[in-house]
C-alpha cells in the first residue's frame, strides 16, 4: 500500500513534514516525498490528513475487565493470595472485549495489559495489538513486565490476611525477591545436574526474568513515599523498574531524575477517590518531561476508557506539557516503557505499519480519525 500526501507526525522529528509512506509485508518499507506507485499497488490518499503512529498505552486492563459486565467479568485481580507472580495476563485476555474496537477506532493500536493492583505481586503484563480473534495471534511480547503494587490497594484487599501497613507490603515483596534469588542461585549452581536442582516453585520461576534483568518490576505507586520505596527495593536487588501512576511524581522531581527510571503517569481524568490521589494533576507529565524523564501517559483503562488516551495527552498539553512531548508520551515512550520500541511507537522504516490518519490534531477531542492500520492492513475506515 502507498499512503500519499499526508502530513507526517512520526514521533521522532519535532516538526511534521509532508511525505508518502509505503508499506509491505506488514512493515513500513519507505518514507519520502513523491514516491512512485508500483504496479498494482493499493493507494490510500491522505491529502489534508495527519498521519501518526498507532497510539500505545503502557498500562491498561483492557481485555481483562470485560466491557459492561462488571465484577463477575473481571479477570485482572486474584484475591486468594497477596503474592501471585505466577499469574499471566495472556491467560485472561479476551479479544472479544467490546472496549477493544472502540479503542482501535480512536487510534490506539497497542497496549500493555495485565493484572490489577490488589496484590503485592500480581503477575505478568503482556504487550498486545488491539486486533484479532485469539490473543496468541495478537501478542507482541507475552511477558513485558512483572506487576507489583504499593500503597492503599494491597493494604485494603489483604488487611484481614496480615497486610495492613506499608511496611508489610514492602516486606512481602522483599521476602519474595530474597527467596527467588536464592532459588535462582541454586538453579545456577546445579547447572545440568538435575539431582542438585531445588524443588520446582512456580512463584520463584516467575520471578527469574525480573532477577535476570529481562523484564522490569511494574510498580503501582501513587504517593511519593511509595515511589521512593519502589526505587529503594529495585536498587537493593539490582532489578529494572518502571513507576506506574506516579501521581505525586511532581513533588519529588529531583529524586526521580536521580533514579532515572521510566514513569507512566495517570489515570488523571477521574476524581480523587482515595487519599493517595489528593495531589493528582494533569501538570505532572509535563513537569516530569521537562525535567528530562521518559514519560508515558496512561489511562489505566477502564478507569479512563481506552479510547480517551489521546484526550489525556491533550489535557496534559492544556496543563502546560510541550505538545511534542505529549505525542511521544502516547507513542514511542510507552513503546520503550514496555520494551517493544523496535516494533511500534514511531513511523520509521522497518517498524510495524501501524498508522492513524486523522483530520486534525490527534490530541484534540474534536478531531475525527479517518483510518487506522495495523500491520499494514486497514482495520478502521471512516469514509476515506
Image (cartoon, rainbow, N blue to C red):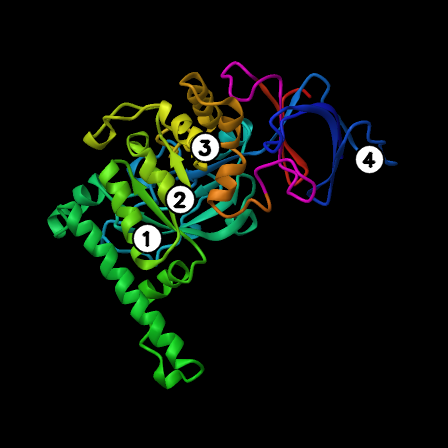
At horizontal 21% and vertical 51% (from top left) the residue drawn is 170
Q: Which of label 2 and label 4 is nearer to you?
A: 2
Name the main secondary structure of what is drawn in magenta. Answer: loop
Provide the residue span drawn in magenta: 344-367
Q: Please tell me whether residue 355 belongs to the stretch shown in magenta.
A: yes
Q: Are marks 2 and 4 in contact (CB under 8 Å)?
A: no
Tell me how far mark 2 sits from mark 4, CA to CA: 44 Å
SS label for mark 4: loop
**Residue, disc 1:** 234
Lower sequence index among marks 1 and 3: 3
Tell me how far mark 4 sits from mark 1, CA to CA: 51 Å
**Residue, disc 4:** 41
Tell me how far mark 1 sits from mark 3, CA to CA: 34 Å
Q: Please identify the quarter of the rendering in which residue 222 is found.
A: top left
Task: Look at the image and tell me whether residue 241 can be seen.
Answer: yes
**How busy is the neighbourhood of tag 4: few (under 14 within 10 Å), some, or many (20 plus)?**
few
**Residue, disc 2:** 261
In which quadrant is the C terminus drawn? top right
Amino acid at each position: 500500500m502507498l499512503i500519499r500526501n499526508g502530513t507526517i507526525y512520526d514521533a521522532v522529528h519535532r516538526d511534521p513534514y509532508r511525505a508518502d509512506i509505503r508499506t509491505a509485508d506488514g512493515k513500513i518499507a519507505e518514507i519520502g516525498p513523491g514516491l512512485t506507485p508500483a504496479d498494482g499497488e493499493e493507494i490510500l490518499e491522505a491529502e489534508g490528513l495527519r498521519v501518526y503512529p498507532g497510539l500505545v498505552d503502557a498500562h491498561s486492563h483492557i481485555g481483562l475487565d470485560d466491557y459492561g459486565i462488571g465484577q463477575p467479568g473481571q479477570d485482572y485481580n486474584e484475591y486468594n493470595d497477596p503474592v501471585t507472580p505466577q499469574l499471566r495476563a495472556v491467560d485472561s485476555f479476551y479479544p472479544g472485549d467490546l472496549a477493544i474496537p472502540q479503542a482501535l477506532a480512536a487510534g490506539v493500536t497497542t497496549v500493555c495489559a495485565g493484572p490489577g493492583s490488589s496484590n503485592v505481586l500480581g503477575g505478568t503484563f503482556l504487550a498486545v495489538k488491539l486486533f484479532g480473534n485469539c490473543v496468541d495471534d495478537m501478542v507482541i511480547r507475552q511477558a513485558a513486565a512483572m506487576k507489583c503494587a504499593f500503597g492503599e490497594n494491597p493494604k485494603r484487599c489483604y488487611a484481614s490476611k496480615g497486610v495492613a501497613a506499608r511496611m508489610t507490603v514492602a516486606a512481602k515483596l522483599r521476602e519474595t525477591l530474597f527467596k527467588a534469588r536464592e532459588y535462582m542461585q541454586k538453579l545456577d549452581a546445579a547447572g545440568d545436574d538435575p539431582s542438585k536442582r531445588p524443588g520446582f516453585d512456580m512463584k520463584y520461576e516467575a520471578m527469574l526474568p525480573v532477577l535476570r534483568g529481562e523484564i522490569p518490576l511494574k510498580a503501582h505507586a501513587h504517593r511519593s513515599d511509595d515511589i521512593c520505596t519502589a526505587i529503594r527495593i529495585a536498587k537493593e536487588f539490582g532489578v529494572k523498574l518502571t513507576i506506574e501512576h506516579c501521581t505525586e511524581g511532581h513533588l519529588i522531581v529531583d529524586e526521580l531524575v536521580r533514579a532515572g527510571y521510566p514513569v507512566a503517569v495517570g489515570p488523571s481524568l477521574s476524581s480523587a477517590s482515595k487519599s493517595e490521589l489528593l495531589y493528582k494533576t494533569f501538570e505532572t507529565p509535563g513537569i516530569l518531561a521537562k525535567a528530562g524523564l521518559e514519560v508515558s501517559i496512561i489511562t489505566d483503562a477502564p478507569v479512563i476508557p481506552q479510547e480517551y488516551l489521546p484526550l489525556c495527552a491533550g489535557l496534559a498539553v492544556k496543563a502546560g506539557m510541550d505538545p511534542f512531548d505529549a505525542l511521544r508520551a502516547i507513542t514511542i515512550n510507552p513503546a520503550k516503557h514496555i520494551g517493544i520500541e523496535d516494533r511500534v511507537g514511531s513511523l520509521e522504516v522497518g517498524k510495524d505499519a501501524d498508522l492513524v490518519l486523522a483530520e486534525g490534531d490527534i490530541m484534540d477531542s474534536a478531531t475525527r480519525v479517518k483510518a487506522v492500520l495495523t500491520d499494514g492492513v486497514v482495520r478502521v475506515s471512516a469514509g476515506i
